[in-house]
Image (spheres, helix red, strand yellow):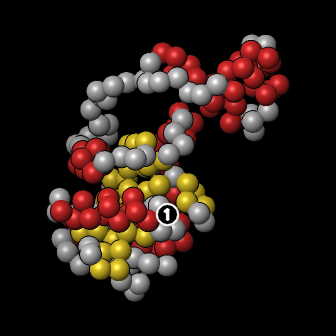
Amino acid sequence: MTIETGDVIDPMRLGFTGDASRSLLVVDDDAPFRIRLARALEKRGFDVVAVDSVAVGVEVAQEAAPRYAVVDLRLADGSGLDVVKALRDARPEARIVMLTGYGNIATAVAAVKAGAVDYLPKPADADAVEAALLTDGPLPPPPEHPMSADRVRWEHIQRVFEQCDRNVSETARRLKMHRRTLQRILNKHAPRT
């Protein structure tokens, strides 16, 4: 377990030392991305603690209750949604942004229901993360490049497929489409946005 803070790796620091109104927890198991994002957000004035697991993320949330958080959805030891829940319990007004490399509508909905204010695909840059964290109101501004209709359709099919526990026959029945048609759609890559 390591906690990155600035340019120094401190295995003992789980708390914040600066301005409490700018405290930020970054939870991601991709070390290069986590360190790069933490450093970029520190340069923007955040007091950052960066950790690599659900267990440590929950511990920091319970003991230090940061004002902001950036949490990866899929971590080596579990789901980032557990960290979001711990953050919401410790500090209900915390602004949380969920990141994932496996984006679809179902996971975005789960993240927002758990308490995240935004959901960004990886690799997200520090500007997009900062904008999502600091946007006033419940929703960020609309995206400059929204999903195409084909992509929305594909995302919906993926969501129903996941909800049916990846059962092709049950998904086809619920979507009222032929099973072979569904299999062809599922075997294709996601349409471009």
| Residue 104 visible in the snapshot | yes
Location of the C terminus by quadrant is top left
User: Which amino acid does the dot numbered 1 rest on?
Assistant: Asp
User: Hey, which residue is sitting farthest right in the picture?
Assistant: 169
Q: Residue drawn at (49%, 63%), measured in percent from left and top?
A: 29
Q: Nearer the viewer, residue 41 or 170?
A: 41
Q: How far across and how far down the image is residue 117, in percent?
A: 37, 45
Q: Nearer the viewer, residue 87 or 188?
A: 188
Q: Residues within 10 Å of mark 1 (few under 14, many from 20)?
A: some
Q: Residue drawn at (29%, 80%), measured in percent from left and top?
A: 8
Quadrant in which residue 174 is drawn: top right
Q: Residue drawn at (79%, 33%), measured in percent from left and top?
A: 167
Q: How far across and how far down the image is residue 181, in percent?
A: 74, 15
Q: How far across and how far down the image is residue 50, in percent?
A: 37, 69
- Which residue is label 1 attached to? 29
Q: Is residue 12 above or below residue 164?
A: below
| Residue 27 visible in the snapshot | no
Q: Is residue 144 left or right of residue 174?
A: left
Q: How far across and how far down the image is residue 80, in percent?
A: 52, 57
Q: Secondary structure at mark 1?
A: loop
Q: Residue drawn at (51%, 39%), measured in percent from left and top?
A: 103
Quadrant in which residue 119 is drawn: top left
